[in-house]
Image (cartoon, rainbow, N blue to C red):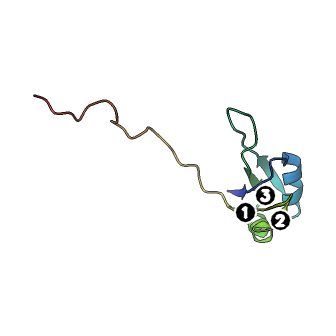
Amino acid sequence: MSVYVGNLSYEVTEDSLNAVFAEYGSVKRVQLPTDRETGRLRGFGFVEMGTDAEETAAIDALDGAEWMGRDLKVNKAKPKEDRGSFGGNRGNNSGRSRY
């Protein structure tokens, strides 16, 4: 499971985020998503810790903490939802009546 980190500064780097979370245990991976169009950071990221206990310690310590001028939002990441299609039959007139 990963930890979601929201309200990040746009100046954050993977190394700086790694350093903050490393205080609470081993960091396996840090991800900072970027906008497809601009390449700019999106203001949130994900950190994968070594154990659930390390994740819990990091969440407890960092949720609401100020870092780089912002109050962090830190919690367990939710699984990515499958967005699938845009509603099935929309726009194909499959429901129109016949005369």
Q: Residue 74 carries which label?
A: 1
Of the two numbered discs 1 and 3 on the same chain, state the one appearing first in sequence.
3
| Residue lying farthest to the bottom in this orientation | 60
**Cβ atoms under marks 1 and 2 closer than 8 Å:** no
Which residue bears the numbered disc 2? 66
Q: Which of marks 2 and 3 is nearer the N terminus?
A: 3
Q: In which quarter of the image is residue 95?
A: top left
Which residue is at 75% across, 43% downward?
Answer: 41
Residue sitting at 76 percent across and 45 percent down?
32
Label 3 sits on residue: 50
Give the residue type that dot 1 points to: Val
User: In the rendered view of the protein, which quadrant contains the N terminus?
Assistant: bottom right
Comparing 36 with 50, the one in front is: 36
Q: State how far apart marks 1 and 2 are (Cα).
A: 11 Å
- Locate residue 68, reporting x and y percent: 86, 57
Q: What amino acid does circle 2 point to?
A: Glu
Amino acid type at mark 3: Gly
Query: Measured from the top left, where is residue 25 in percent x and y?
Result: 85, 62
Q: Which mark is residue 5?
A: none
